[in-house]
Structure formats: C-alpha cells, structure tokens
Image (cartoon, rainbow, N blue to C red):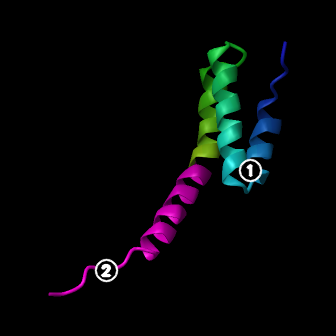
Amino acid sequence: MLRFDLIEYQQAARDLNQPASLFQMWEEVCRLYDRGIIGKYELDEMKSVIWPSLKAVSALRKRVDSSFETPPQAA
C-alpha cells in the first residue's frame, strides 16, 4: 500500500513552482482519494495548498494571453 504523509505532500506542493508539476500533484492526490488511500480530510487539506497556486497561475496566463490580443480598430 502506498504511504501518504500529508505534511510531506503539503510541503512538496508549496515547493513546486511549475504549473505542470502542480497539476500532476493534484491529479495524483485525486487518484489516491479515488482509490480510498486518503480520505476527504487529506483531499481538502491538499486542495487548500494546491488550488491557490493553480488559480494564480491561471490568472497570470489569462493576463499574458489578453496582452497579446489586439484592441478593436475604431471605424
């Protein structure tokens, strides 16, 4: 059986700075929950660590993407 240490996972999530790595960790946590290896409490605790970073990355990406859009030309 896979060992899940909530404190270690939370620290690892805080140390991640790559969006792909954060998504990968979130997917791993969800798989652990789906398999019954971790409970709702651990899922919620990991969500509270990972999601703020994912939201920040998403907001930054939207700002960058919108900066490349050209404003409509006045007629």
- Please tell me which residue is depicted at 53% across the width and 62% down the height of the picture: 61
The span shown in magenta is 52-75
Vertical position of residue 57 compared to residue 43: above or below: below
In terms of depth relative to the viewer, which is nearer, 64 or 56?
64
On whether residue 30 falls in the magenta region, the answer is no
Vertical position of residue 12 compared to residue 53: above or below: above
Per the picture, the main secondary structure of the magenta-coloured stretch is helix
Q: Position of residue 54 (x, y in %)?
A: 58, 50
Image quadrant containing the C terminus: bottom left
Instruction: Give the Cα separation between the discs numbered 2 and 1.
Output: 37 Å
As helix, strand or loop, the secondary structure at mark 1 comes to helix
As helix, strand or loop, the secondary structure at mark 2 comes to loop
- Please tell me which residue is depicted at 42% across the width and 70% down the height of the picture: 66
Q: Position of residue 38 (x, y in %)?
A: 70, 19
Residue 71: mark in rendering: 2
Vertical position of residue 27 compared to residue 52: above or below: above
**Total number of numbered labels?**
2
Q: Which residue is mark 1?
A: 14
